[in-house]
Image (tube, rainbow, N blue to C red):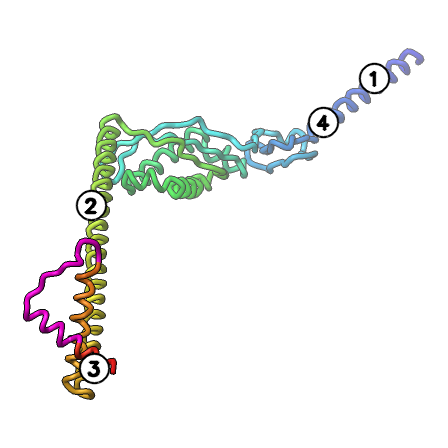
Amino acid sequence: MTEAFILNLITQNIVFLLATVFIIILILKGVRIVPQSQKFVVERFGRLKSVLGPGINFIVPLLDSVAHKVSILERQLPNATQDAITKDNVLVQIDTSVFYRILEPEKTVYRIRDVDGAIATTVAGIVRAEIGKMDLDEVQSNRAQLISQIQTMVESAVDDWGIEVTRAEILDVNLDQATRDAMLQQLNAERARRAQVTEAEGQKRAVELAADAELYAAEQTAKARRIEADAEAYATGVVAKAIAENGLEAAQYQVALKQVEALNALGAGDGKQTILVPANALEAFGNAFNMLKGAGK
């Protein structure tokens, strides 16, 4: 009896220990701690059951299993280069870079096998299509607009995969050597044309300024002549008025005064004290002096 009791007790302890171990294993199987940077996709008998977010989560042991552990960190596709032809038939090579992250892992794991390859193929097709709608000058000058269009179209294309495209970049637009040489020639020709236009505009401006200067000079000369003519007309009017008021004697008096002033001017200065004049001139001067003498009285 004693040995049977001991054997029974040992058996019960072993069963209890096994049960305890089994329970512990079930508990461990039912508890899932998900890191902040991941999400777990849980399946039950091969079908999607739930998606576990960061933190402590519980599942049904033996029935549920974690089928996929998906990182939700932002990812960068390897830089890709694809050929494209612009609207004006220029072959260009576009270097692109795309950043994305998985928002809904249940869509990603069940709808697409190679995420990176699928996104890269989608980006290449969209880039070629958009470049084909634009001229080369538009591609180079409107790069920000082109990037925005590409990102919008890529986001729409990958939305069914539970993916968010956070950024799309065009790193470089490369041209073949023949196209570069042609563009350089065009640039040099444009610079030469601008230089010629600038020189022609300068010459035109110089001619305009010279014409303005001549016009100004002519206007000033005409103004001076007009003032002189007005002065002469005024003097003539004064003389005419004096003659009308005082008679002929006033005019004769003015002529005599001018003759005396002229004689004084001839006698002024060194070496001019002896003056030879015609006899009729002396008679005229004598009359002038008599008139002045009479006027003085």
Residue kind at label 2, given as amino acid type: Ala
Residue depicted at 23% across the width and 28% down the height = 181
Q: Which residues are magenta?
A: 269-289
Closest to the camera, between mark 1 and mark 4, is 4
Closest to the camera, between mark 3 and mark 2, is 3
Q: CA distance from mark 4 to mark 2?
A: 89 Å
Q: On the image, numbered disc 1 is attached to which residue?
A: 11
Q: Compared to 145, does 173 lie above or below?
A: above
Q: CA distance from mark 2 to mark 1?
A: 114 Å
Residue kind at label 4, given as amino acid type: Leu
Q: CA distance from mark 1 to mark 3?
A: 179 Å
Q: Is residue 179 left or right of residue 139?
A: left
In the structure shown, which secondary structural element does the residue marked by tag 4 occupy? Answer: helix
Q: On the image, numbered disc 2 is attached to which residue?
A: 200
User: Disc 1 or 3, which lies upstream in sequence?
Assistant: 1
Q: Residues within 10 Å of mark 3 (few under 14, many from 20)?
A: few
Residue depicted at 37% across the width and 41% down the height = 146
Q: CA distance from mark 4 to mark 3?
A: 153 Å
